[in-house]
């Protein structure tokens, strides 16, 4: 019999830690290899973590609410293997002791005697601090029960719960003089009146995260939006002629979304300076075209899975990819890596009956395209015998872009080029 450490797995190229939400198994339970044992949350998605070994869950090292770095142990599993996976001497004892300290430390709600300068804070903790309007000077006084004094989710929530019941000693430094006004004033929160019969609904974790990101994006990027109306009659007719064959052959629905994404990928190849990110005073030009696709969840929240290298798919491949990630997004079965690395985003506001929208940019991208509803309209068309009025299928494309690095000429040309590709769609194209 051997004791092996179950480690926090790597869940994406940019994800370095995760917060334990809940354990699906208890100490003493028998578990199978690849069986899900706990649920964790990153700053991108909630996901389940499978066990790397079969055996008995002997000890849980990471408690609910703790932030654990990738590669760190989260549990001890007793297996029937003859050889023990190499670990440090007395690893069980050395790891379980800090776990006991965490339980004791979370009961403390008083501020630290001195601010802890230079301490690392996870994205989850920073999001909660921003939501609760906790300045950095105050955050540095919050006691941390994590490794090296880190503030865990439980620490910050415990502090917020008891905040206001005790005086908060925020140190005064030369950077925050008491005899002068701050250079940047924080807008006052508007008073909210509550009347009889009003329902108070607590935001869930994802909604709080979305709210924080949207506010941060607007603060970061000066948004400008350009609009173009496109005639997509050829696309509507082609889809109507091919959707049954696609359903029979591929087993899924042929929607307009993959056609739109194909046109966006082609336009990005024509204008690669829309496929960039801003890092201080430098511009990072992305090699890959990774298109995010906004998906509405049953909860009403929004999630944006990413189609990596979207320009390398044919139309059928894009259609199958869109159907797959949209289904798994609604089932909460996406991996964190599938939500990372986007370089441009599309949002189909037309699916809600909206003719156009002005979407907010997904940082650190610089552009996002809203796809409006397809509507029948009378339009003037050119014929061999002259102009004529006909019923056409039209839609609005709304391109929001970061005006720090994308001027109106580029932003307008990109959305115009997408419309050109849609209008020139070959109605005789085969699947």
Image (cartoon, grey):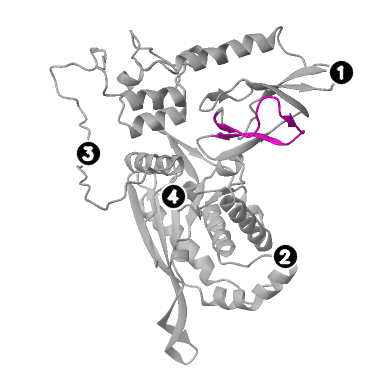
Q: Position of residue 412 (x, y in %)?
A: 39, 58
**Mark 2: secondary structure:** helix
Residue 22 in view in this figure: yes
Q: CA separation, marks 2 and 4?
A: 32 Å
Disc 2 marks which residue?
250
Numbered range of the magenta stretch: 19-41
Q: CA separation, marks 2 and 1?
A: 47 Å
Lower position in the chain sequence, tag 4 or tag 1: 1
Q: Nearer the viewer, mark 3 or mark 1?
A: 1
Q: CA separation, marks 3 and 1?
A: 62 Å
Q: Which labelled disc corresponds to residue 189?
A: 3
Crowdedness near tag 4: few (<14), some (14–19) or many (≥20) residues, C-alpha within 10 Å:
many
In this view, the residue in front, 127 or 112, is: 112
As displayed, is residue 370 above or below residue 402?
below
Q: CA separation, marks 2 and 3?
A: 52 Å
Residue at 56% across / 55% down in the picture?
265
Disc 1 marks which residue?
82
Mark 2 and 4 residues: CB-CB less than 8 Å, in contact? no
Q: Nearer the viewer, mark 2 or mark 3?
A: 3
In this view, the residue in front, 47 or 3, is: 3
Lower position in the chain sequence, tag 2 or tag 1: 1
Q: CA separation, marks 4 and 1?
A: 55 Å
């Amino acid at each position: 019999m051997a004791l092996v450490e179950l480690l926090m797995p790597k869940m994406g190229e940019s994800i370095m830690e995760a917060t334990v939400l809940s354990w699906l198994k208890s100490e003493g339970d028998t578990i199978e290899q690849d069986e899900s044992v706990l649920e964790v949350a990153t700053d991108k998605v909630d996901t389940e973590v499978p066990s790397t070994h079969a055996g008995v869950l002997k000890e849980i090292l990471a408690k609910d609410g703790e932030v654990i770095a990738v590669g760190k142990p989260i549990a001890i599993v007793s297996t029937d293997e003859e050889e023990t996976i190499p670990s440090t001497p007395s690893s069980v004892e050395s790891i379980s002791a800090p776990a006991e300290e965490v339980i004791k430390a979370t009961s403390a709600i008083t501020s630290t005697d001195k601010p802890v300068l230079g301490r690392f804070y996870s994205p989850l903790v920073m999001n909660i601090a921003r939501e609760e309007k906790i300045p950095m000077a105050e955050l540095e006084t919050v006691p941390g029960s994590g490794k090296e004094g880190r503030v865990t989710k439980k620490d910050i929530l415990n502090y917020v719960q008891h905040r206001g019941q005790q005086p908060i000693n925020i140190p005064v430094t030369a950077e925050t003089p008491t005899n002068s006004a701050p250079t940047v004033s924080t807008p006052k929160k508007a008073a909210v009146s509550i009347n009889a019969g009003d329902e108070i609904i607590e935001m869930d974790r994802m909604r709080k995260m979305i709210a924080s990101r949207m506010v941060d994006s607007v603060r970061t990027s000066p948004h400008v939006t350009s609009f173009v109306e496109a005639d997509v009659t050829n696309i509507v007719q082609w889809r109507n002629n091919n959707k049954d064959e696609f359903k029979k052959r591929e087993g899924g629905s042929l929607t307009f979304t993959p056609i739109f994404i194909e046109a966006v990928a082609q336009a990005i190849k024509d204008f690669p300076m829309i496929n960039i990110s801003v890092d201080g005073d430098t511009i990072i030009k992305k090699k890959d075209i990774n298109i995010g696709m906004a998906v509405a969840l049953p909860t009403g929240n929004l999630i944006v899975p990413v189609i990596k290298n979207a320009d390398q798919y044919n139309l059928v491949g894009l259609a199958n990819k869109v159907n797959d990630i949209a289904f798994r997004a609604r089932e909460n079965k996406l991996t964190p890596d599938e939500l990372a690395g986007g370089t441009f985003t599309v949002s189909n506001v037309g699916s809600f009956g909206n003719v156009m929208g002005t979407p907010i940019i997904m940082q650190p991208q610089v552009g996002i395209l809203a796809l409006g509803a397809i509507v029948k309209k009378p339009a003037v068309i050119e014929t061999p015998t002259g102009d004529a009025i006909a019923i056409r299928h039209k839609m609005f494309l709304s391109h929001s872009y970061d005006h720090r690095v994308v001027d109106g000429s580029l932003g307008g040309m990109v959305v115009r080029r997408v419309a050109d590709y849609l209008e020139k769609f070959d109605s005789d194209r085969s699947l």
